Image: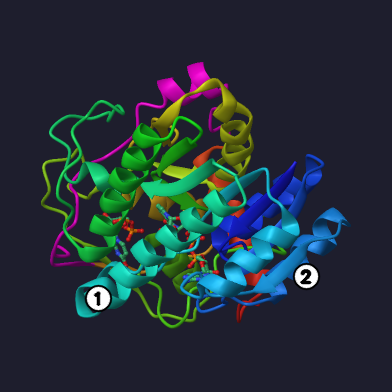
Amino acid sequence: MNVLVTGGAGYIGSHTCVELLNAGHRVLVIDNLCRSNPEALNRVRKITGKELLFRRIDLLDYDPLLAALREFSPDAVVHFAALKAVGESVRMPLTYYENNLAGTLNLCRAMSAVNCKNLVFSSSCTVYGNPARVPVTEASPTQNAECPYGRTKLFVEEILRDAAAADAAWHIALLRYFNPVGAHPSGLLGEDPRGTPNNLLPYIALVAAGKLPELSVFGNDYPTPDGTCIRDYLHVVDLAKGHLAALDGLPRFAGARAWNFGTGAGVSVLEVIAAFASVSGKKIPYKIAPRRAGDVVATYADPTRAREELNWSAELPLAQMCADAWRWQTQNPDGY
Ligand code: NAD
Ligand code: UDP
């Protein structure tokens, strides 16, 4: 298949390109590189030994986007391109709505123009907010998110559902990722945040490397077994493979359908710290800090639907996620 990958130079997109190329697909990445480094694309080429097409295009620029789709003639699109920093979205809500909503609308318009209506969309467990019950199934209610970033995911899901309801030619997968972490086992691809990371795993990796003095654990007085928040961390390579499963499954499902992508296991912040320390052999100094505003207390997936309908399950354990994140950190101390 010809698969167009928006945001393919980013963290999850680059790992997914590896899996797509290894499965024999022809891949075009469209990315404006606003949050990524083109070296990631070279690393994908190096890992796979395959050709990877790339056009530097902003999804907000409709004409070049349409021209690229006409030329490539995609059979399906995997749509990662978005801004994703929670705090930044609170400070710059209009930028987030424009980029994530208008970017998606332009993409759908261009797809319609070339008659490609197979779409895999990167959604997030953030659409469930602070869930009343865990594990979270796809039938759990979506809730108004805590931040503009989260709302862009909720709004795009709704827009895509409306599009699919109006036109049966659309097949749309709404993939609700839980917490993707880790890196490619080669050590060549990984998460490369700009500045000080906001997310737990990249922060821990920098503390283990001695580049940051200590981790702040945001709250240890939550109603959880050790008092810290619970998340469902999944290996980015498992997640990347899930996109292949979703592409395979698309023709079997009419309209827009949501799938949870997680392991099904809830893991606390202190458990992640212990796992990373054990795998890296490094001390991870940490202090207990106040709760972070807007943090969800506990969320983890019920991944049954993805297993039964897409034949996909996350397989790699937490130790492997930490080992691969640590390999990426040590082999690329300054990122790409
Ligand atoms: P990332 O920032 O590494 O990658 C996003 C890519 O999109 C970047 O390469 C960026 O340059 C590109 N991009 C952004 N706006 C663009 C635009 N207007 N035009 C063209 N390219 C544009 O992020 P990621 O972690 O790989 O996340 C990929 C997707 O998965 C995002 O939609 C994100 O919201 C979603 N998601 C991520 C997580 C996570 O924890 N990483 C969790 C749930 C959902
Ligand atoms: N966390 C933390 N210190 C940090 C970063 C994160 O204690 O420096 C905690 C955070 O409160 C949450 C968990 O780690 O409970 C995962 O946070 P992350 O930002 O990685 O993911 P999200 O909250 O978006 O699921």
Viewer-closest of 244 and 220: 244
Q: Are marks 1 and 2 in contact (CB under 8 Å)?
A: no
In this picture, which residue range is highlighted in magenta?
288-315
Question: How busy is the neighbourhood of tag 2: few (under 14 within 10 Å), some, or many (20 plus)?
Answer: some
Label 1 beta carbon within 8 A of ligand 1: no
Q: Residue at (27%, 49%) from the top-left corner?
A: 154
Indicate the colouring scheme.
rainbow
- Which mark identifies residue 198? none
300 is within the stretch colored magenta: yes
Q: In this view, does 143 lie to the left or right of 159?
A: left
Viewer-closest of 187 and 301: 301
157 is within the stretch colored magenta: no
Residue 319 lies, in percent from the top left, at: 54, 44
Q: Residue at (83%, 54%) from the top-left corner?
A: 48
- Which mark identifies residue 94? 1
In space, the residues marked 1 and 2 are separated at their CA atoms by 33 Å
Viewer-closest of 184 and 32: 32
| Dot 2 amino acid type | Asn
Q: In which quarter of the image is the N terminus?
A: top right
| Dot 1 amino acid type | Leu
Residue 28 lies, in percent from the top left, at: 71, 59
Per the image, label 1 sits on a secondary structure element best described as helix
Q: Is residue 133 left or right of residue 84?
A: left
Q: Which of marks 1 and 2 is nearer the N terminus?
A: 2
Q: Quadrant of the C terminus?
A: bottom right
Look at mark 2 in the image and give the residue it sits on.
Answer: 42
Q: Main secondary structure of the magenta part?
A: loop
The quadrant in which residue 264 appears is top left
Q: Residue at (42%, 69%) from the top-left corner?
A: 203
Q: Is residue 77 left or right of residue 81?
A: right
The quadrant in which residue 55 appears is bottom right
